[in-house]
Amino acid sequence: MNVTPQSAILPEAGPYSLVCVFNLVGNRDKVVRQCQGLFEVAEKLNQQHVSACVRLSFGFGKAFWQQFEKGCPNDFEEFAPLGSGDVTAPSTGGDLLLHVHSNRHDLNFHLLSSFLQPIASEVELIDETNGFRYLDARDLTGFIDGTENPKKQAARHEVAILPEGPFAGGSFVMVQRFVHNLPAWHAVHVAQQEKIIGRTKPDSVELDEVPADSHVGRVDLKEAGKGLKIVRHSLPYGTMSGEHGLLFIAYCAQQRNFREMLSSMYGEKDGQTDKLLDFTKAVTGAYFFVPSTEMLMQL
Ligand code: HEM
Ligand code: MG
C-alpha cells in the first residue's frame, strides 16, 4: 500500500507556524470534507507563491477518531494531567488539530480562514497560536531549540512515522502551549540558566556534566542504550503585553516516548522535576493521531 505522511511532519519547521485546536460542535462529515479539501487549497497557494512552502497536517483527538470505525492505533491514549504543586501540566483535550508551517505568516492566516469560513458553526476553535522563528532558532529564553532534533529526512521518517500495520504512514502528535515567566528567567545568571537547560547559551553545547534536573537531563532518555527520539516543530509565540512562550509540538511513531519524557519532566519517575518548569507553565496539553494522507482522504 502506498502511504504518504501528511505534509507538515517531515520538513523542518518553516519560520511561521499556526497551531489550532478545535472541538467539534456540529456536523462531523462537513468538517472532514473540509479537512480533505484543504490540501488542494494549500497546493494552489504553493503554485501561486513558489517559495511559500505551505505544509499542513490534521490530527484527531481519541474520542473523535473513534467515531470513524477505523480502529484505534495501539497505544493511543488521551493526555493525562501531570505533576503537583506549582509544576503541573493540564490536559485540555480537543477533537481536531491543524498544524501549518510555511515561509509566509499571511498564507497561514489565509489557509485557516479558507478552512474555517464554511464550517464556522460546526467547530469551536479553542486554541489558536501563531508561532515565529526567533533569532537563530531560539526559544524566548534565549536558548537554541532544536539542536538534537533529528535532521535528515530518513531519520525524521524513522522517528515520526508508523512504519507498518493498518496505520502505516500515520504519526502521533503532542501539543503543549507553555507560558513563560521571562522577568523571573532574566533575573537568573546565565551560568545558572545553562545548568537549568543543560546546554550552553551562545552555541548550545551540551554541558560536560548535565544536571539530572536540567531540561536535557530530564528528556534525553535512553532505553537499552538507544535514545528515545521525537521530531519537534515547536516555535515561540505571543506578545510582550500578553502571554508569550513556546508552542511545543512534536511528532512520534510511539506515543510512549512522549509519556516517558513528560513523566520524567513532571517528577513522576524519580521525584525530580525539570527546573525549566519553574519558569514556564503549560496551559494546554493534548495528544492527536495524524493518519496518513491516504487514510485521511478515505474518512
Ligand atoms: C531539548 C527547550 C519542552 C523534549 C531542548 C533544548 C531546549 C529546549 C533549549 C536543548 C536544545 C535541543 O536539543 O533542542 C524547551 C522549552 C520547552 C521544552 C523552552 C518548554 C517551554 C519540552 C517538552 C518535551 C521536550 C514538553 C517533551 C515532552 C525535548 C527533547 C530534547 C529537548 C527530546 C532533546 C534532548 C536531547 O536529546 O539532548 N528543549 N523544551 N521539550 N527537548 Fe525541550
Ligand atoms: Mg543527547
Image (cartoon, grey):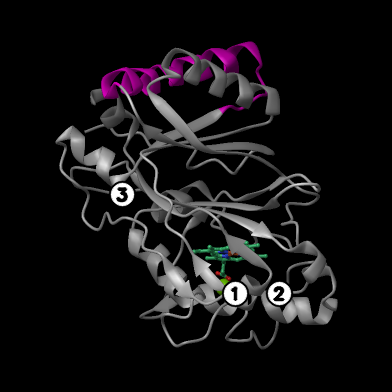
Label whose residue precedes the other's in the sequence (2 or 1): 2
Image location (x, y in percent) of residue 216: 60, 74
Q: Which quadrant does the C terminus fall into?
A: top left
Label whose residue precedes the other's in the sequence (3 or 2): 3
Image location (x, y in percent) of residue 7: 47, 33
| Left or right relative to 174: residue 152 | right
Q: Nearer the viewer, residue 46 or 59?
A: 59
Mark carried by residue 199:
2
Q: Is residue 43 above or below residue 103?
A: above
Image location (x, y in percent) of residue 43: 51, 17
Ligand 2 found in image quarter: bottom right
Foreground tag (1 vs 3): 1
Mark carried by residue 135:
none
Of helix, strand and loop, which one carries label 1?
helix
- Can the viewer see residue 148? no
| Left or right relative to 17: residue 162 | left
Q: CA distance from mark 3 to mark 2?
A: 31 Å
Q: Residue at x 62, y 79 (%)?
A: 214
Residue wearing tag 1: 216
The crowd level at tag 1 (other Cα within 10 Å; few <14, some 14-19, many 20+) is many
* Magenta region: 27-54
| Left or right relative to 20: residue 170 | left
The crowd level at tag 3 (other Cα within 10 Å; few <14, some 14-19, many 20+) is many
Image location (x, y in percent) of residue 102: 63, 31
Residue wearing tag 3: 162
Residue type beneath disc 2: Arg
